[in-house]
């Protein structure tokens, strides 16, 4: 019975040691590439709005997970702030101009260097895509 006890003990130890490894969440490879590129820089956003297709400019600075920047629209330059976590950006206008909807943004950095997401206001959501400005 001693050999059987030794085998069972070894098996139990292996299972205990393997459990934390298999329980650790793994980041997808495309998230790693997108996160390495970062969100900082100048972007051109294209969106289908209630007023038709429109392009906007977005300039972002990234300090760790913190995002700050400027969203440029027909209403002018509007400050934004938020964060980027695991390739997902969430940010919002910190002060919307008078008679302009306060927008909140959620987007994912993609491994091809673009991003895609939604701009949300009280009026609803608008899908957008963005490319780095040249």
Image (tube, grey):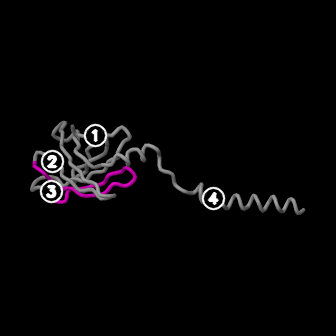
N-terminal-most mark, 1 or 3: 3
Highlighted range, magenta = 75-95
Asked whether the residues under the numbered discs 2 and 4 touch, taking CB atoms below 8 Å apart as contact, a structural biologist would say no
Count neighbours of disc 4 (C-alpha within 10 A) and say few if under 14, some if 14 to 19, many if 20 or more. few
Q: Which quadrant would residue 117 be assigned to in this image?
A: top left
- Label 2 and label 3: CA atoms lie apart by 11 Å
Q: Is mark 4 on a helix, strand or loop?
A: helix
Residue beneath label 2, please? 72
Q: Which mark is residue 96?
A: 3
Q: In this view, does 80 lie above or below 118?
A: below
Position of the C terminus, as image quadrant, is top left
Q: Distance between the residues labelled 4 and 1?
A: 40 Å
Q: Which mark is residue 19?
A: 4
- The residue to which callout 1 is attached is 129
Mark-to-mark CA distance, 2 and 4: 49 Å
Can you tell which of label 4 and label 1 is closer to the viewer? 4
Query: Which image quadrant is residue 6 in?
Result: bottom right
Q: Mark 1: give few (<14), some (14-19) or many (20+) Cα within 10 Å.
A: some
Judged by depth in the image, the label closer to the viewer, 2 or 3, is 2
């Amino acid at each position: 019975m001693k050999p059987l006890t030794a085998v069972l003990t070894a098996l139990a130890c292996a299972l205990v040691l393997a459990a934390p490894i298999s329980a650790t969440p793994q980041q997808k490879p495309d998230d790693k590439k997108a996160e390495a590129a970062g969100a900082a820089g100048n972007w051109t956003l294209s969106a289908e709005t209630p007023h038709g297709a429109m392009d906007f400019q977005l300039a972002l600075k990234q300090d760790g997970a913190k995002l700050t920047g400027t969203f440029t629209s027909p209403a002018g330059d509007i400050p934004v702030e938020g964060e980027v976590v695991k390739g997902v950006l969430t940010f919002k206008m910190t002060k919307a101009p008078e008679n302009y909807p306060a927008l909140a943004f959620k987007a994912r950095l993609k491994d091809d260097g673009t991003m895609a997401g939604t701009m949300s206001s009280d009026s609803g959501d608008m899908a957008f895509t963005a490319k780095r400005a040249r």
